[in-house]
Image (spheres, helix red, strand yellow):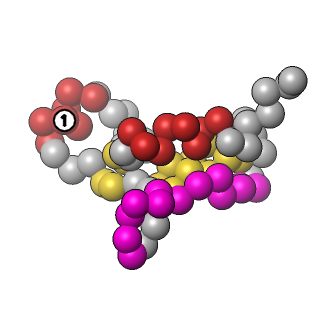
Amino acid sequence: MRIQKIAQDPESRPNGSPTLYRTDRGSWLVQGWNVTDPAVLAEMGIPEGESAVEIPDRMIPFFFEGQDTGR
């Protein structure tokens, strides 16, 4: 898999996390804050081998950067 960094959270100092990456497989990688609240994880019903990270609303517009829209 090849990845391209799309955006780092401009308001997160000093580490610039969360970060969004686009893959060459038509998917996204999201670097964010670990979700560790047991009640939230139970409600999500995350299966073995998967996990969840939290990102702020301000990162959502970056999902569309680097995406080939076919236009």
Whether residue 2 is visible? yes
Query: With 53 as the anchor, is 59 left or right in this view?
Result: right
**Mark 1 neighbour class, 10 Å CA radius: few under 14, some 14 to 19, many 20 or more:** few
Q: Amino acid at mark 1?
A: Val
Say if the magenta span includes residue 40. no
The residue stretch that appears in magenta: 2-14
The x and y percentages for residue 53 are 37, 47
Residue drawn where x is 21% and y is 50% of the image: 36
Element class at badge 1: helix
Question: Looking at this rendering, what residue extends furthest in the right direction?
Answer: 71
Q: How many numbered callouts?
A: 1
Task: Identify whether 40 is placed above or below 15.
Answer: above
Splitting the image into 4 quarters, where does residue 71 fall? Answer: top right
Splitting the image into 4 quarters, where does residue 64 fall? Answer: top right
The x and y percentages for residue 10 are 47, 60
Q: Which residue is mark 1?
A: 40
Residue drawn where x is 14% and y is 42% of the image: 38
Question: Looking at this rendering, what residue extends furthest in the left direction?
Answer: 39
Residue drawn where x is 49% and y is 37% of the image: 60
Q: Work out whether residue 53 or residue 67 is closer to the camera in this orientation and state it.
A: 67
The x and y percentages for residue 40 are 19, 35
The x and y percentages for residue 59 are 47, 45
Q: Work out whether residue 70 or residue 30 is closer to the camera in this orientation and state it.
A: 70
Residue drawn where x is 38% and y is 46% of the image: 55
Q: Work out whether residue 26 or residue 15 is closer to the camera in this orientation and state it.
A: 15
Task: Identify whether 23 is placed above or below 2.
Answer: above
Task: Identify whether 8 is placed above or below 65.
Answer: below
Query: With 13 as the anchor, is 36 left or right in this view?
Result: left
Whether residue 51 is visible? no
Query: With 26 as the anchor, is 63 left or right in this view?
Result: left
